[in-house]
Amino acid sequence: MTRLTTFADREATAVRASIEIARALELAREQRGVAHLALSGGHTPERTYELLAETFASWEGVEIWFADERCVGPEDEESNYRMAAEKLLRPAKIDPARIHRMIGELGPEEGARGYADELRAHVSLEDRDPSSSPTAAPTASPSSLPVLDVIALGIGPDGHVASLFPGAPTLDAGEQAICLGVHDSPKPPPERITLSLAMLRNARRCLLLASGAGKADAIAAALAEPTHHVPASLLERDRLTVIVDDAASPPPGLA
């Protein structure tokens, strides 16, 4: 069952999100000796990353990944990597060898193929450990996909997560898809690279972060019946934690 937590404002939401991510990383390192964290863009994640840089004691053994990226260079203002580097990676002095950037300048298809290969090379395909989340269900057999420990996700007003947009064919890429090229994003720029829905669902834990009244309808829809019209609603709910401020909170009784 989805865990929903609400806070008074964006700052309190980001504080709680940073604490949840830190706990997940510490647990992963304790259990497996390494922790795999995937980052997204967005205003609430941005503040969360600043707080993580200030408060998380040690980044040793933490591998940094990305949930999606625009097909631009790393210094472009549209780059998710640039934001993460400014708010987290450089301030926290994370070892560049542990930072796995989606190379957006390669274009959607080549960039996606390269990132899938990098994930296969560095991230275990082992079962999710049920103890990594209080609500996680055990898997019956080893996963055929790399298993990320925690993915921090924002949500768009249309309910998109990463660069998986409503009704897009990428939502039907299948259970073996790892990373996908996007050519027709409804938000500019149109070309992007994204983790697949299967990868998001396969993670030990996803955190969905939102703040502001403009996200309230999207959060409500994400917690309603699963539909391709709202990609966030397709996340694996047994391993999903939703952290929002009061303005973005769904009506009582919905979650």
Image (spheres, rainbow, N blue to C red):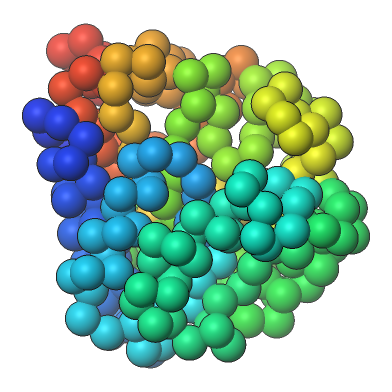
Q: Position of residue 240 (x, y in %)?
A: 36, 43
At x 50%, y 55%, the residue is: 83
Task: Tell whether 248 sits left or right of 147.
Answer: left
- Looking at the picture, tell me which residue is in the foreground, 237 or 116: 116
Task: Tell whether 254 sits left or right of 224.
Answer: left
Q: Is residue 75 above or below residue 168?
A: below
- Quarter of the image holding residue 58? bottom left
Q: Position of residue 76 (x, y in %)?
A: 67, 53
Q: Position of residue 113 (x, y in %)?
A: 84, 62
Q: Is residue 248 above or below residue 239?
A: above
Q: Is residue 57 above or below residue 244?
A: below
- Quarter of the image holding residue 110? bottom right
- Looking at the picture, tell me which residue is in the foreground, 117 or 236: 117
Q: How many marks?
A: 0
At x 16%, y 12%, the residue is: 252
Q: Position of residue 33 (x, y in %)?
A: 38, 89
Task: Tell me if residue 208 can be seen.
Answer: no
At x 58%, y 87%, the residue is: 97
- Quarter of the picture containing the C terminus is top left
- Quarter of the picture containing the N terminus is top left
At x 75%, y 35%, the residue is: 189
Task: Tell whether 181 sits left or right of 225.
Answer: right
Task: Tell me if residue 11 can be seen.
Answer: yes
- Quarter of the image holding residue 218? top left
